[in-house]
Structure formats: structure tokens, C-alpha cells
Image (cartoon, helix red, strand yellow):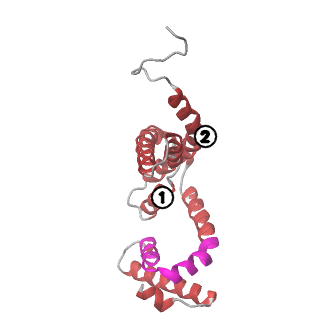
């Protein structure tokens, strides 16, 4: 909270320049110590809170979207599409495992909040498509030449979940309806006719 109070300014321009200056300073220090500049920028975001963070969020949202698009474009520039088919099998296995764990997490979390089965299914299926952070981690690994083969795998994985996730979200309610309407085989069926 101390840093936020120090840099907070009612002037949008002063706040924006201060945050960008601190971010560049931290990126320079990160470079000096041979640490990722992205990690340094993340730390700046974590250190800010309160009015400074609220003001920065409002000011930087358009830039965030622009830079995110540029980041993903650069990941694509560094990737040869012919590298994706050899890793598709691994991407499918990872996709199945993580889709299952994401679904289970969403189902459990929604259930803890008191949401019914249809809502739980919808919340769980919505989580499946999330995976953009995988691209960010893979981009950092490829850029720093830690693991150059990680890029095609991450891109294949994210594309797979980006296709399957919305389909699962769309079908979650009809599937939940079908299972909820299925007769319970453990209880005897009652009829309205007298015996």
C-alpha cells in the first residue's frame, strides 16, 4: 500500500508516466540480474493496490489489449505451422487431462457456492477454453531459448481448448438436462392408477 500511496496522482498523465517509469526501471533491474522483464512487470502490478491500481487499470486497459494482441502475434511469428502436427498427440492428451481437471474444479467450486447442477455444468464447461496463460509461459520459454519445442505444443494445446471449450459450454446445459431427467433406477416408480 505504501508504493501505491507514493505514486498515486489525480492526474491521469502523471499516474500513467509514473507506472510506466517504475515498470521500465524494474525491467532494467531484471535485465541486470538476468531475470525475465515480464516477471518484473508482474511484480509491479502486484505491488500496486488501492486508488493507484484502480486508476492504472482504467488507464492501461486499452494498452493491455493492444499489447496482448501484439504478444500473441509475436508468438505466431516465431512458430512454423509445420511444427504443430508432430505435437498434436501430446496436445490432445494434455487437453483431455486439463479439460477434465478444469471441469471438475468448476463443478466443485460452483457447488460450494450453492449453484444447482445446470449452473455447475455451465460454470465448469466455461473454464475449459481458458489457456492463454499457457501461451504466455511458452512464449517466455521460447524467447529465452529454455525450451524451443514448447511453443508448438502450447499453441496446439490452446487452439484445441479454444475450439472444444465453447462447444462444451454450449452443450453443457442440454447434457445436464438429459442427466437430470434420467429416471433414478434405485427408487421404485409410482403410478397414478390404483392397484
Question: Dot 2 lies on which element?
Answer: helix
Magenta stretch containing residue 44, yes or no? yes
Q: Which residue is mark 1?
A: 133
Q: Toward the viewer: 53 or 73?
A: 53
Q: Residue furthest top?
A: 195
**N-term mark: 1 or 2:** 1
Task: Decide: few, some or many residues near mark 2? Use Cα within 10 Å; few <14, some 14-19, many ≥20.
Answer: some
Instruction: Tell me the residue at 62%/73% (across/down).
Output: 63
Residue 20 disc label: none
Q: Toward the viewer: 81 or 8?
A: 8
Judged by its main secondary structure, the magenta piece is: helix
The residue segment tinted magenta is 38-63
In this rendering, the answer to whether 103 lies above or below 143 is: above
State if disc 2 and disc 1 touch (CB < 8 Å).
Answer: no
Instruction: Tell me the residue at 44%/63% (across/down).
Output: 140
Placement of the N terminus among the 4 image quadrants? bottom left
Q: Which residue is mark 2?
A: 170
Q: Position of residue 34 (x, y in %)?
A: 36, 75
Question: Dot 1 lies on which element?
Answer: helix
Q: Position of residue 138 (x, y in %)?
A: 45, 57
Q: Residue furthest front?
A: 194
Q: Position of residue 116 (x, y in %)?
A: 49, 43
Q: Residue furthest left?
A: 33
Instruction: Tell me the residue at 47%/79% (across/down).
Output: 49
Amino acid at each position: 500500500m505504501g508504493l501505491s500511496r507514493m505514486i498515486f496522482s489525480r492526474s491521469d498523465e502523471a499516474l500513467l508516466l509514473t507506472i510506466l517509469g517504475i515498470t521500465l526501471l524494474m525491467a532494467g533491474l531484471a535485465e541486470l540480474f538476468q531475470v525475465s522483464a515480464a516477471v518484473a512487470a508482474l511484480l509491479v502490478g502486484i505491488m500496486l493496490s488501492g486508488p493507484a491500481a484502480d486508476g492504472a487499470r482504467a488507464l492501461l486497459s486499452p494498452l493491455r489489449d493492444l499489447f496482448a494482441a501484439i504478444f500473441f502475434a509475436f508468438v505466431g511469428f516465431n512458430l512454423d505451422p509445420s511444427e504443430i502436427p508432430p505435437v498434436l498427440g501430446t496436445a490432445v492428451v494434455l487437453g483431455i487431462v486439463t479439460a477434465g481437471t478444469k471441469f471438475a474444479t468448476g463443478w466443485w467450486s460452483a457447488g460450494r457456492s450453492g449453484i444447482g447442477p445446470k449452473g455447475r455444468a455451465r460454470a465448469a464447461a466455461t473454464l475449459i477454453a481458458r489457456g492463454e496463460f499457457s501461451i504466455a509461459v511458452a512464449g517466455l520459454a521460447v524467447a529465452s531459448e529454455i525450451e524451443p519445442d514448447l511453443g508448438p505444443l502450447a499453441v496446439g494445446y490452446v487452439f484445441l481448448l479454444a475450439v472444444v471449450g465453447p462447444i462444451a459450454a454450449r452443450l453443457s446445459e442440454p447434457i445436464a438436462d438429459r442427466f437430470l431427467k434420467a429416471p433414478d433406477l434405485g427408487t421404485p416408480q409410482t403410478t397414478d392408477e390404483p392397484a
